Amino acid sequence: MCYAIPGRVEAMDERFVTVDYFGEKKRAINELSDLRIGDYIYAQGGYVIQALPEQEARSILSVWKETFFELQEMDLQLSRLDMKDRGVDKKTLRLLDKAAESRPLSGEELYHLLNLENDHERSMLYKTANFLRRKHLGNSCCVHGIIEFSSYCPRNCFYCGISAHNNKLARYRMTDEEIYAAVDEAVEKHGFQALVLQSGEDPEFPAPRLAGIICEIKLRHPCLIFISVGEIGIDGLRELYDAGARGVLLRFETSNPELYQTLHPGYSLDSRIAHLKAAYEMGYLIITGGLIGVPGQTKRDMLNDILLARELHSEMYSFGPFIPHPGTPLADKTVAPVEQILNTLAAARIADPDNAKILVTTSFETADPEAREKGLMAGANSVMLNVTPERFRECYEIYPNRAHLHESIPVQIETTLNLLRGLGRAPTDLGV
């Protein structure tokens, strides 16, 4: 949860293996020295996580196979595309038809789609994005867990509730043992196999300490670890990668350098981009993206945000709405309309149809209670559940009244799985 489906290794080529899942072939990076052709494995995020006994794998596959093909058929029905919809002008219909055929769209063509305001045209945009999601990535939907282990941060970002601007926040730091206990519960009790460790840029968690925490987690559990701790430095990224981290969640927030500096006084977009490029070169899976509707942003900026995320080789696109926090300088601003958020997710899918996992962010769910279903039907295929111990969650207030703040992990899982079943989605990052 993200559920990993066992697959059989059919071929090996240096660092890569080819794995069979219900007749579909997938490639994954292998770092296990004793893996052999014919073994059954779990994989997450394009990495082999662990091997498992054949009897256990076959037992799991026998349970899931029928269900997964039922989900596949349901998703196929829900993602059918009819390009004869009325109320769509000829230019928009031509661009959507081009996108549906997986022909690349120019920046100006994407800009046109990003700016659609007619309800019928927007509906067709979302249907096209959902069709492309199904066409290229199947009915998979990543369900990762996130543990927010510290709300301390010295940065002064204008929009963030845990920034230094907010002097009313009751801050916290989890101890190393509390982090291990949260990971143990998420993996052993609830079945998560991909986790994000997130915090502010807390000086009490320098790279060596984080590396030790990651090493201990990897000793305890074969899981995929993402880090989300801001700009820890290029050397810090290398140290955490060597410790076993394989993904980084680091949003650039805006591709506009002037706007970035306005929102982050004393910091530069160049530094953020340098971190993301270095992380990719090291082998990290990249999760990045921007804010939607932040004050000072233009529609052209939003297009450039999507193009920058694609340029940075994003494994997962994370675009969520700006939500004002009363303890920040942008307290009196407003949230972007839901349609603008959906247009962005759909345009991101069309910009990178065959690669991107697109996240329905918690901020979107906070802005709209129906965001998860709307986003998943507009091209998205990933969600994150909060597996931070409940006693800490209120103090990680990056924006107020966060969705799922007081929901237990079992309730979050049940709600998510019920929604995914209703949409024909499989809770795994390996489509079937």
Image: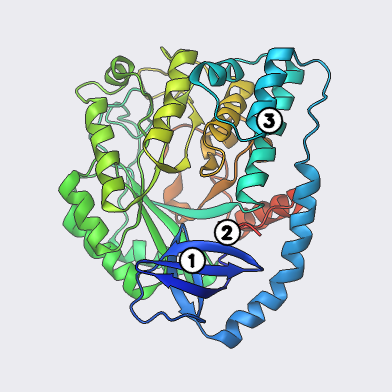
Residue at 66% across, 68% down = 22
For label 1, the crowd category at 10 Å Cα-Cα, with few meaning under 14, some 14 to 19 and many 20 or more, is: many
Residue type marked 1: Ala
Mark yes or no: residue 370 visible.
no
For label 3, the crowd category at 10 Å Cα-Cα, with few meaning under 14, some 14 to 19 and many 20 or more, is: many
Q: Earlier in the sequence, mark 2 or mark 3?
A: 3
Residue corresponding to mark 2: 430
Q: Quadrant of the C terminus?
A: bottom right
> Where in the figure is residue 310, as x and y percent of width and height?
43, 34
Residue type marked 2: Leu
Residue corresponding to mark 1: 43
Residue at 47% across, 80% down = 37
Disc 1, SS: strand
Q: Quadrant of the N terminus?
A: bottom right
Q: Is 348 placed above or below 134 here?
A: above
90 or 214, nearer to the observer:
90
Answer with the quarter of the image where residue 79 lies. top right
- The image shows a total of numbered marks equal to 3
Q: Earlier in the sequence, mark 2 or mark 1?
A: 1
Disc 3, SS: helix
Residue corresponding to mark 3: 126
Residue type marked 3: Tyr
Residue at 21% across, 26% down = 267
Cβ atoms under marks 2 and 1 closer than 8 Å? yes
Cβ atoms under marks 2 and 3 closer than 8 Å? no
CA gap between label 2 and label 1 equals 8 Å
